[in-house]
Amino acid sequence: MPESATQNHSHQVTLSSNRLVRALWFSGGMVCLGLGLVGVILPGLPTTPFMILAAACFAHSSERFYNWILNHRTFGKLVRRFREGKGVPLKIKILGASTSAVFVTFAVLVAMPQHMVAPRVFTAIAGVIGVWFILSRPTDHGD
């Protein structure tokens, strides 16, 4: 039997004491969860980074959703390993960074009007920072 079918990897979380803050964390988690689920269907949109972000948001807002992600048979192991400090598999880092680079490049060079210099520069800088962030995370070698 696969590991996730035989073990429950539930964790207790420390929820935010402020209801508004908890609602904001939960909303962010739902947005990331939705993007991650869309990534299961759409090639090129990575699932794991969004599930890692969703888990981080739910760790502050919903123990139930946090544990659902940790125990999911498809992406739970990757999220658990990242949350344990083991990093992101190289394949996922490359896919995430290249997807981000392609979409940001398209946005800056094609989709955004040429006269909107400041937004294009901001988007380019944000894209570089995003790709750097993805590539700077520890690499999980599956040990």
Image (cartoon, rainbow, N blue to C red):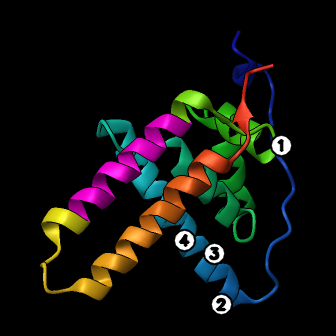
Is the residue under label 4 in contact with that under label 3 (CB below 8 Å)?
A: yes
Crowd band around label 2 with a 10 angstrom C-alpha radius: few (<14), some (14–19), many (20+): few
Q: Is residue 123 left or right of residue 70?
A: left
Whether residue 131 is visible here, answered yes or no, is: yes
Q: Is residue 50 left or right of residue 124?
A: right
Q: Which residues are magenta?
A: 93-107
User: Which mark sits nearer the N-terminus, 2 or 1?
Assistant: 2
User: Residue 120 location, x and y as percent?
Assistant: 28, 77
Q: Nearer the viewer, mark 2 or mark 1?
A: 1
The residue under the point 34% across, 78% down is 121
Three-letter residue code for mark 3:
Trp
Q: Is residue 99 magenta?
A: yes
Residue at (41% x, 55% y) in the render: 35
Going by the numbered disc 4, the residue's amino acid type is: Gly
Q: Amino acid at mark 1?
A: Glu
The label number, if any, that marks residue 20 in the structure image: 2
Of residues 52 and 134, the one nearer the viewer is 134
Horizontal arrangement in the rendering, residue 121 relative to residue 87 (left or right):
left
Q: Position of residue 41 (x, y in %)?
A: 31, 38
- The mark found on residue 28 in the picture is 4
Residue at position x 39%, y 79% in the image = 122
Indicate the position of residue 13 as horizontal and vertical percent values: 84, 61
Tell me, yes or no, whether the highlighted magenta stretch contains residue 98.
yes
Element on which disc 2 rests:
helix
Label 1, label 4: how far apart the Cα atoms are: 21 Å
Give the number of the disc on residue 25.
3
Mark 3 or mark 2, earlier in chain = 2
State the separation of the CA atoms marked 2 and 4.
12 Å
Mark 2 belongs to which amino acid? Leu
